[in-house]
């Protein structure tokens, strides 16, 4: 017996023994946490990812506060239609990528790459927009210069090459790369062979060191990467975290978290805008109980104005915001979505026999009846 439950989330945290751990912020060097930020819900980013000249945070759909959101507003289903059956109508009806990216959020994230390939084959004109707006599970590569692992995403990609945060070099090497966040062909922002300016690169190195400690304390393993790039009035970046369950056994799990942020500098304060996405896949395979697959992705957004005293303050501020977002998303995932899935599965499948259940209910009714006499 095989069961597959797919649902749309909007945040979460780690896979493995580290779930539910509490870490002292002083160990991370981030100091006291900021006032609780207002968390907002919004759709996937559909505007040119990683480009300084375009909006990093898609805002075409209404933004809801946590108080206004229905916590059970998720797509829960036991079967998912083939994407090829849906895309012909979608491509004919819409001229942009929003319907495509919205539907991809509701499909199993383990198959995002194949679904994305099917859509692109039907609508090649959407290739760039889809690749820049659809979050895919993070891939891992080892840096040739440092020997350390780093994560691949659209923010450190130029064609088939990806920039390592440890060596600041592209693999495979590019013919030419621009400095100061400007690509070799004049494009600004991330990607396109761009490397950050000297100041932003120094912050990038320190941020990678800080989040490497964060990853070790919270996830007890996994891989983390931080990439920064220049903006006209500040800088932007992405924090990536990946944790996979120990291979072997009957349980498999992968956690990918992607935190994209903008830091707009305003004198002694900086306006931070963080969009966090968690892609989670949990599966169990048991010869007696059958197969169970819980997969989904979740997105949340937060904005905050925080004081800044030097470049190191940016790392501490972003660290606190990311930490707070992951804790809130994990709690929401565990208490609401997993709780709802557990209730649904419990109603669909009974561990005991139906006759035993009927006998227990009859005994309960008799007991209640005797108490009322």
Image: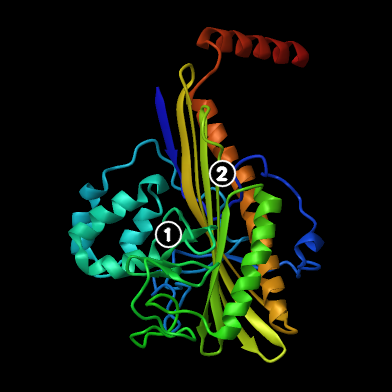
* Element type where label 2 sits in the image: helix
| Residue 160 falls left or right of residue 237 | left
| Nearer-the-camera pick, 359 or 353 | 353
Q: Which residue is mark 1?
A: 135
Report the front residue among 83 and 62.
83
Residue occupying the point 21% across, 62% down: 91
Mark in the foreground, 2 or 1? 1
Identify the image's colour scheme: rainbow, by chain, secondary structure or one colour. rainbow
Tell me which residue sits at (60%, 38%) in the image: 339
Q: Position of residue 153 (x, y in %)?
A: 44, 63
Residue at position x 39%, y 74% from top? 47
- Name the secondary structure under disc 1: loop
Residue 34: image quadrant is bottom right
N-term mark: 2 or 1: 1
Give percent across and percent down for residue 130. 33, 65
Mark 1: few, some, or many residues within 10 Å (few <14, many ≥20)?
many
Q: Nearer the viewer, residue 106 or 24?
A: 24
Image location (x, y in percent) of residue 325: 64, 61
User: Looking at the image, do the residues carrying marks 2 and 1 touch, with CB atoms under 8 Å apart?
Assistant: no
Image quadrant where one finds the C terminus: top right
Disc 2 versus disc 1: distance between alpha carbons? 20 Å
- Tag 2 residue: 337
Residue 89 screen position, x and y as percent: 20, 56
Residue 28 - label: none
3 shown above or below 123: above
Number of marks drawn: 2
Residue situated furthest front in the rendering: 145
Label 2 environment density (alpha carbons within 10 Å; few <14, some 14–19, many ≥20): many
Which residue sits at x=59%, y=51%? 12
* Extreme-bottom residue of the structure: 267
Where the N terminus falls, by quadrant? Answer: top left
């Amino acid at each position: 017996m095989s069961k597959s439950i797919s649902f749309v989330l909007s945040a979460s945290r780690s896979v493995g023994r580290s779930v539910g751990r509490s870490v002292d912020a002083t160990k991370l060097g981030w100091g006291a946490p900021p006032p609780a930020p207002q968390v907002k819900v919004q759709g996937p980013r559909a505007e040119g990812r990683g480009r300084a000249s375009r909006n990093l945070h898609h805002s075409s759909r209404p933004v809801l506060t946590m108080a206004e959101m229905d916590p059970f507003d998720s797509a829960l289903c036991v079967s998912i239609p083939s994407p090829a059956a849906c895309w012909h109508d979608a491509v004919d009806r819409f001229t942009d990528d929003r319907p495509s990216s919205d539907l991809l959020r509701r499909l199993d994230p383990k198959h995002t790459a194949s679904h994305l390939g099917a859509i692109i084959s039907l609508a090649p004109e959407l290739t760039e927009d889809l690749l820049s707006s659809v979050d895919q599970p993070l891939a891992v590569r080892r840096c040739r210069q440092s020997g350390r692992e780093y994560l691949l995403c659209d923010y450190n990609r130029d064609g088939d090459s990806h920039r390592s945060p440890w060596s600041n070099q592209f693999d495979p090497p590019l013919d030419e790369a621009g400095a100061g966040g400007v690509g070799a062909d004049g494009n600004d922002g991330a990607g396109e062979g761009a490397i950050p300016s000297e100041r932003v690169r120094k912050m990038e190195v320190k941020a990678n060191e800080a989040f490497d400690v964060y990853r070790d304390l919270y996830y007890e393993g996994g891989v983390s990467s931080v990439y920064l790039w220049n903006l006209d009035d500040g800088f932007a970046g992405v924090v990536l975290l990946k944790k996979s369950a120990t291979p072997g056994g009957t349980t498999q799990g992968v956690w990918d978290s992607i935190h994209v942020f903008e830091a707009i500098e305003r004198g002694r304060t900086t306006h931070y805008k963080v969009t966090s996405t968690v892609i989670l896949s949990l599966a169990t395979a048991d010869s007696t109980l059958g197969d169970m697959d819980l997969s989904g992705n979740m997105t949340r957004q937060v904005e905050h104005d925080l004081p800044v005293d030097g470049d190191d303050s940016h790392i501490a501020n972003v660290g606190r915001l990311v930490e707070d977002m992951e804790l809130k998303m994990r709690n929401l995932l565990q208490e609401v979505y997993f709780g709802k899935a557990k209730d649904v599965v419990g109603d669909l499948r009974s561990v005991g026999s139906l006759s035993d259940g009927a006998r227990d209910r009859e005994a309960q009714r008799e007991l209640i009846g005797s108490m009322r006499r």
